Amino acid sequence: MSVAAFFDIDGTITRSTILDPLIWYRRAHDSKPRFALFGLGMLLRAPYYLWVDRRSRARCNLVFFRRYAGMNARSLREWHRRTFAHNLQRSIFPPPSTASVTISDRVITSFS
């Protein structure tokens, strides 16, 4: 059994949202029709996510991260490590060119 920890760093440490990493992964792994269906499903659920977020950010995060259920944790972890520079690192505040970013097995730390 794998355990994951999620941190709400969106808009504070990064210019990303909780949706971005899932989109990056799905775009890279799904066929175009399957990714289009995923996108449509997200659009249809957007009002629900907004409603939940207004009531509780913690609950919204929990509801959203359930979208990862059934995905291969090892595959997700390896793919995000391999593509970090292309995806998440580009959205870190301040821009990575002026910050020192360290990636360990469990933590990403940014010092400016």
Image (spheres, rainbow, N blue to C red):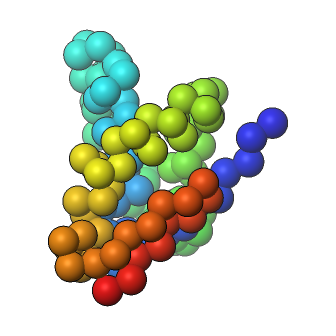
x then y, percent, for residue 56 = 55, 71
Q: Residue at x 18, y 71 (%)?
A: 97
Residue 11 visible: no
Q: Residue at x 29, y 29 (%)?
A: 27
| Above or below, 20 relative to 59 | above
Image height check: is 61 above or below 86? below
Outermost residue to the right: 1
Of residues 39 and 28, the one nearer the viewer is: 28
Report whether 107 appears left or right of 22.
Answer: right
Coordinates of residue 36 in the picture (x, y in percent): 25, 23
How many marks on residues?
0
Quarter of the figure with residue 7: bottom right
Q: What residue is shown at x 29% (from left), y 13% (from top)?
A: 31
35 above or below 17? above
Q: In percent of the image, x 41 and y 56: which residue is there?
A: 18
Q: Quadrant of residue 43?
A: top left
- Quadrant showing the C terminus: bottom left
Image quadrant where one finds the N terminus: top right
Asked whether 79 or 15 is in front, the reply is 79
In percent of width and height, residue 82 lies at 40, 39
Residue 31 in sight here = yes
Give the side of residue 60 with respect to residue 93, left or right: right
